[in-house]
Amino acid sequence: MHEVKNIALTLSIVFLAVTFSCKQKEETPKIEAAQEITLGSLLKPLDTPSKGKAHLPRLVAQNGALHMTWVEQEDSLAILNYATYKNQHWSSPKTITSGADWFVNWADFPALAVNGETVLTNILQKSAEGTYDYNIKLNLLTGDSLVKSNFILHTDGIPAEHGFVAMRPYDDGFYVSWLDGRDTKNEKKEDNQMTLRAAIVSMDGTIKEDTEIDPRVCDCCNTAIGITYNGPVVVYRDRSEEEKEIRDTYIVRWVDGAWTTPKAIHNDQWNLNGCPVNGPAIATQEENVVVSWFTASNETPRVLVAFSQDNGATFSTPVRVDAGMAIGRVDTAFLKDGSALVSWLEPLGDKVVLQVVRVHQDGRKEAPITITTTSAARASGFPQIEVMGTTVYVAWTDLQDDSSQIEMTSFEIE
């Protein structure tokens, strides 16, 4: 594990031009301009339980422990592992499932949720010869036992794209959202739409209340789900009618036994004929909701954050947190005082830095913290932040030549 050093210095932040498409080839970032910003941090490197070629970490703080899943690669075999961190020690990793027929993708990663002693995860398994034909397979784990393994979330039986899963504990089970491509196989082009669906997964693996909650959404941006006092809320990147192609961040809420009409968190009016592969993040705390997201409306890539104090019904004016021309790949978490942390990637010279900033509900933001230098390459994935007590944990994928490994650090915050 490379050393993550304490940082307190002035950095030159450079602008980066990003080309958006979920099926594009990777391109070298183009440097446009530069500005300076002072950053600082006090970071404690943390060993990880992963080994070999590892990537796609997911973090959840629950029951006084930090839970993590990740994927390890052994040639063509992909392995989904799980471990917990408690009292400054990692448990022995458990292999949840493995396979050589998975769709392993930098942006469409396994999700993780914990309810009591039960853990829910997912993988994506190829269902046909098409590149994007794959199913969502769920796994339920309690202690050392798999309650139910590799069972399908959706019931359509159509070889199409199903992915970008988000999940949260809910009552005596889990609420799960995902992008569902069953309608992309329609004969009529005008009916070919990616949809957003949600369902409840019970503790024994029963799928209930499988419902379409938006009939037309962006094809390959991750979804995010939170649980408020009123019930579940899902945030995602919407897609307006083809003539306009507006790709703003929307929210849909479960209220009084039904899903509300989808509503924009803010009308960024990002017109884009393609998918940015850059979905939102959400955190909830009682009736409070915080959402962070990436947009490039008006040709200005940036990261925004907005708060709600009424279970997601209305949101404050967004606050911009990046220093300029952000890459995105956001995450967010509430702190105990109601402020929130937001993480994202942005350019630094010919490299990229992982930033974290604290934002207050009145719009004030503190000085950002540089966690590490990383890469704009897709394989660097989506870094994760999670708060447990007064400790913030950060995980990301570090690229090393043709390999990768998971790195972690932590810092204290009041």
Image (cartoon, grey):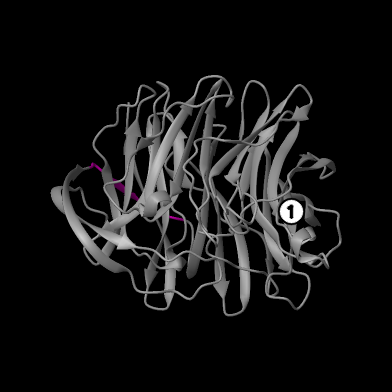
Q: Is residue 374 left or right of residue 51?
A: left
Image location of residue 258, percent across then percent down:
78, 29
Q: Amino acid at mark 1?
A: Leu
User: As drawn, is 353 to the left or to the right of 18?
Assistant: left
**Quarter of the C terminus within the rendering:** top left
Q: Is residue 349 above or below residue 129?
A: above
The image shows a total of numbered marks equal to: 1
Residue 234 lies, in percent from the top left, at 63, 38
Image location (x, y in percent) of residue 391: 38, 35
Task: Look at mark 1 in the image and give the residue it sits on.
Answer: 138
Residue at image point 29% right, 31% down? 365
Query: Which is nearer the eye, 155 or 407?
Result: 155
Residues drawn in magenta: 41-48
Figure check: 338 above or below 178: above
Residue 143 visible (yes or no): no
Would you say residue 389 sits in the magenta stretch? Answer: no
Give the SS element for disc 1: strand
Which of 80 and 268 lies nearest the eye of the viewer? 268
Residue 377's image quarter?
Answer: bottom left
Q: Residue at x 30, y 61 (%)?
A: 16
Foreground residue among 236 and 165: 236
Q: What residue occupies the far front of the structure in this picture?
A: 243
Q: Is residue 412 left or right of residue 198?
A: left
Quadrant of the drawing holding the N terminus:
bottom left
- Is residue 44 magenta-colored? yes
Q: Main secondary structure of the magenta part?
A: loop
Q: Residue at x 48, y 50 (%)?
A: 270
User: Can residue 154 be seen by looking at this rendering?
Assistant: yes
Q: Quadrant of residue 221?
A: bottom right
Q: Position of residue 141 (x, y in %)?
A: 71, 48
